[in-house]
Amino acid sequence: MSTVLYYIIPFVIVLGILIFFHEFGHFLLAKLFKVMVLKFSLGFGPKLIGKKVGETEYVISALPLGGYVKMLGENDDEEIAPEEAHRSFSEQPVLNRIAIAAAGPIFNFLLAFLLFCGIYLLSGYPIMTAEVGHVRPNSPADEAGILKGDLIEYIEDKKIDEWKDIRKFIEKSSGKGITMVIMREGKRISTIVFPKEETVKNIFGEEIKSALIGIVASGNIEKLQLNPFQAIKKGGEKTWEITYLTFLTIVKLFQGVVPLKTLGGPIMIGQLTGNLARENVSYLLPLMAIISINLAILNLLPVPVLDGGMILFCLIEIVIRKPISIKKREMAQKIGFFILILLMAIVFYNDLLRIITK
């Protein structure tokens, strides 16, 4: 198999699954509210294969960079027979229209949640152990007698299960002394550490004040075997963590903290999926979950032509108690389409620049 196919096939499969779940959300809610679905398409452009079942045509199209569910009455200039008006999308109550529009992103969040739950249930939950890999000289930890190789078991009588638990306790200490119990060569040792507030950089490169004690993790990874309830809990936590981080990244983009050059598009996704598939197909699942969350959030942005734009129109309709005029909707959609094209141009440019400068 050629190198190109190694990248294209995983990319098409991953994107196809994500798009299917997204569009299936719209489809399912439309059917639930008795809206007539005319077409369910995976991909855009020319039809490759298709079959009509009942009133809906199911299609796979040539360009695998999206998909759509075409419902009766979506377009303002569409002619609708009087006997079918009640099955038109535009004639649905506003809350029904919001639910149909939101269902696509919600199903992407659901897919990510199910993937994380499945991964943790079958493969275990990976944690970085609380073993100290390095102690900075003259730091609070050094002054408290903590050594490389020590395993931190308790902080203030709270069990430490993984390295990130240590950071939570230290950040909340506000410079006060904290009692730590460490395991060293089979013996438990208790010591008091006085964290110091220092200026550090967060994941976005911003300088922030944080309480530190001067230790670095050893980097040892262990996998905890979880029961179904624990896997569901951890799956939910991970889905929320990635969702929050993605929203925060978008905010930082608008603030100019995160540069536009860091954005990636289809080419970067293709490279990532291809590289992971060649190394181990199972590595694709966490990436698929992360991309699914990103796809959900992207579609929820209040930009006309996206699901978030439709939801915004509906919310405005609730406030002003009447539909937005066709002229205003068309103008907003043109602006939204321009924004979308501009965003696509930026990510394609970034992708090509990464290839050229490699």
Image (cartoon, rainbow, N blue to C red):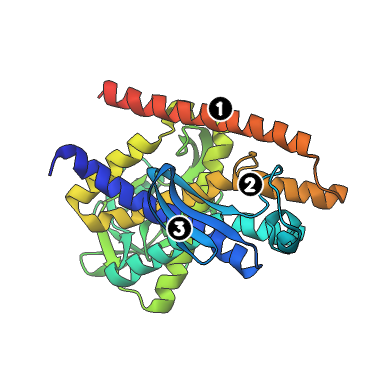
Please rate how many residues cluster around mark 2, counting C-alpha atoms within 10 Å: few if below 14, some from 14 to 19, many from 20.
Answer: many
The answer to the question of whether label 2 and label 3 lie on touching residues, with beta carbons closer than 8 A, is no
Q: Quadrant of residue 1?
A: top left
Residue type pointed to by label 2: Gly
Judging from the image, what secondary structure is the residue with disc 1 in?
Answer: loop
* Residue at the extreme left of the image, as rendered: 1
Within 10 Å of the Cα at label 1, are there few (<14), some (14-19), or many (20+) other Cα atoms? Answer: few
Residue assigned mark 1: 256
Q: Is residue 319 above or below residue 355?
A: below
Q: Amino acid at mark 1?
A: Gly
**Res 287 visible:** no
Number of numbered discs: 3
Alpha carbon distance from label 2 to label 1? 23 Å
Distance from the alpha carbon under mark 2 to that under mark 3: 25 Å
Q: What amino acid type is highlighted by mark number 3? A: Tyr
Residue ID at (42%, 31%): 262
User: Of all residues shown, which one is farthest toward the right?
Assistant: 321
Quarter holding the C terminus is top left
Residue named by callout 3? 58
Sequence-wise first label, 2 or 1: 1
Q: Distance of mark 1 from mark 3, alpha carbons? A: 42 Å
Q: Nearer the viewer, residue 2 or 155?
A: 2
Residue holding disc 2: 308
User: Counting residues from the N terminus, which is met first, the one under dot 2 or under dot 3?
Assistant: 3
Q: What kind of element bears circle 3?
A: strand
